[in-house]
Image (cartoon, grey):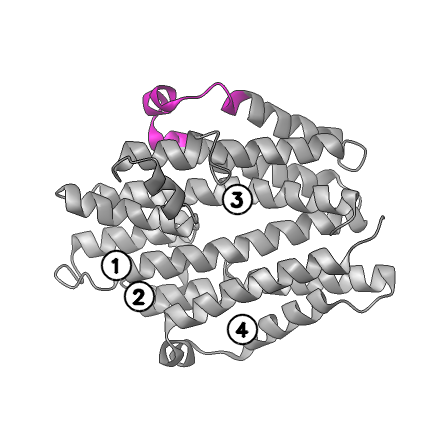
Amino acid sequence: MLSRAADSLYWMSRYMERAENTARLLDVSYRMSLTATDAYSQQTQWEPALVVAGCEAPFKKTGKKIDARNVIEYLALAADNPSSIRSALWMARENARAMRTQITTEMWEALNATWLEMRTLDYAKIEAMGLRAFFDWVKERSHLFRGVGYGTMTRDAAYRFVRVGTFLERADATARLLDVKYHVLLPSTRDVGGAVDYYQWGALLRSVSAFQAYRRLYRDAIVPRRVAELLVLREDMPRSLRSCFRELTRLLDELREMFGRDYVSARLADQMYNRLRFETIDNVNKQGLHEFLTEVVENNAEIGKAIAKDFGLDF
């Protein structure tokens, strides 16, 4: 296990990033569902959201049908769902409360205010404010918390554990979202190149704040191969896998230097980063994008376990 301090800081940032990523997942699912024409199409747009969040089995136990309202309520508001936005924000706040001496006052106030507002919301209220407005609110509160931390924390071990949690969670979310949404969209050939196709791929890019970056870098129509390249291999794309592992490798190397120890987690992150540095999208496609992304998710889990084992110390 991580030491109490490291554990709380690490999971505080992971839960905050998880809340944001769940909001992004629901946002892209909602955007795509606007093009659905019948109940079956609605289900094919919302079921992947449950798969990405790892909630497919527990949701089925509720007996509710898969539609916009039920999935949003479960992934955003359900107190009994540990993967919901509400639960993630509560857990982030509880971990922050335990570490008030390790984080800045501004960080605590930003996170506490977010939770106090979140606990007053139900589906009727977020529907009244607008679903996309709610998703944007969650993302903005996460950005505020992360920005305040970046601007106010001293660059010590505590700061690095906060950042490690952020980038490990982000890499996992990007891999899962791309994998599931890529396979939902790819078989849909009837509208390839048309308005619906463009809108859906555009929605996927917007879900990771990459639409403008795509247009600036590629300057042509949105095509699946380049979407995958942008979100997997482009180091200048902040939410890409390569960018996340670059930061993760740097942070774990700095912790290794601070504590004067050799850590398995640092070696695993470095191996994944170097693979991404020298990989090409053609090789990824030859292996199979699904197989490649599954491997990334499994590696993330191994890195997470290694971090827990490596940093059983008090700083």
Give the residue number, with chain letter if any, for mark 1.
185
Q: Which badge, 1 or 3, comes first in the chain's sequence?
A: 3
> What amino acid is labelled 3 in the image?
Arg
- Pointer 3: what residue? 18
Residue at the location (39% across, 66% down)?
228
User: Can the viewer see residue 238 in this picture?
Assistant: no
Question: Which residue is the site of mark 2?
Answer: 224
What secondary structure is found at the residue carrying circle 3?
Answer: helix
What amino acid is labelled 2 in the image?
Answer: Pro
Residue 47 location in percent, x, y?
A: 30, 47
Q: What residue type is labelled 4?
A: Leu
Secondary element at image label 4: helix
Mark before the other along the chain sequence, 2 or 4 = 2
Q: Do the residues labelled 2 and 3 touch (CB within 8 Å)?
A: no
Q: Are marks 1 and 2 in contact (CB under 8 Å)?
A: yes
Residue 273 position in % (x across, y down): 60, 71
